[in-house]
Image: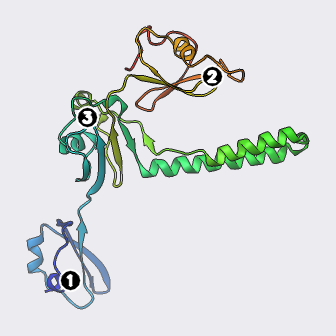
Amino acid sequence: DIIFFSNGLSRSADEDFVTVEKIINGIATSRRLENFNKLMSVKFDDGDKLFIRDLALRTVTISGAVRNPGTFELNEGDGILELISRSGGYRKNAYPFGGILLNNSALEVAEFAREELYRSFLSSIADNAALLNQSDAITSISFLLSELKNTPVSGRVNAEFNIEKILDDKNLNTILKDGDSILIPEKIDHIYVFGEVSNQGSVAYSKQNSIDDYISLKGGFSDMADKTSIFLVHPNGVSEKLDRKNVFRDGISRA
């Protein structure tokens, strides 16, 4: 009767997790039933409570170079391996090494870190106010504060998308959370060069090129370039600081 009056079970009802709460002789008790059918044998009294848990489903989205992109509901504990399988697997032009996993919690942490950095910068400026008398210094600081405040952040989480590696080591199967989204890009043959160079943008990838070659192809360093701080950001989101050696010829190319 109580199920009928509550308009029946929802689509996400977990029939294996049914709990009846009662007050017996002034003491609160909780009894978990073995299965949903056991509910028929329970005698309810005034004030009793019946709790049927929702299934712990996670709604995740996958787009890009998979056979069936879209939004899927996964079970608790499912990860990238299960999502790729549900989406039909990779297409021939897929580039799993460049896969992107975006997570809302990671985004919140990144936003918090940016705000903390901004506040720390403001505090440092206040502590050194006497050194900021020159108008040029004030202009530069204002520009930096604006750039820092408006710098976009990402909720990207580094994850493994190589199915063979995940099958060999299930610890690499990143568990997905509700609201996660994944993008599997197509294969590309470009290197992107940004920062203090004469002409930012993309350059055709070649295994024969060194870091200096790619920089030269974009017009070389600008006058403001810090040549001791060159960073390589790999398609999977991992970054590393480099010295100016030929990392592509030395066998650590990820292309």
Q: In the rendered structure, which amino acid carries the disc numbered 1?
A: Ser
In the image, which is nearer the foreground, mark 1 or mark 2? 2
How crowded is the residue under tag 1: few (<14 C-alpha within 10 Å), some, or many (20+)?
A: few
How crowded is the residue under tag 3: few (<14 C-alpha within 10 Å), some, or many (20+)?
A: few
Residue receiving disc 3: 170
Rendering coords of residue 124 (x, y %): 78, 44
Q: In the rendered structure, which amino acid carries the disc numbered 2?
A: Ser
- Seen in the image, is 77 located left or right of residue 229? left
The disc label shown at residue 198, or none:
2
In the image, which is nearer the foreground, mark 2 or mark 3? 2
- Name the residue located 49 percent from the left edge and 44 percent from the top edge: 154
Residue receiving disc 1: 6
Q: Quadrant of the N terminus?
A: bottom left
Q: Can you tell which quarter of the image residue 157 is in? A: top left
User: What is the CA distance from the residue labelled 2 to the residue labelled 3?
Assistant: 45 Å
User: What is the CA distance from the residue labelled 1 to the residue labelled 2?
Assistant: 68 Å
Q: Secondary structure at mark 1?
A: loop
Q: In the rendered structure, which amino acid carries the disc numbered 3?
A: Lys
Q: Nearer the viewer, residue 202 or 247?
A: 202
Mark before the other along the chain sequence, 2 or 3: 3
User: What is the CA distance from the residue labelled 3 to the residue labelled 1?
Assistant: 41 Å
| Label 3 with label 1: CB-CB less than 8 Å | no
Q: Secondary structure at mark 3?
A: helix
- Name the residue located 21 percent from the left edge and 33 percent from the top edge: 91
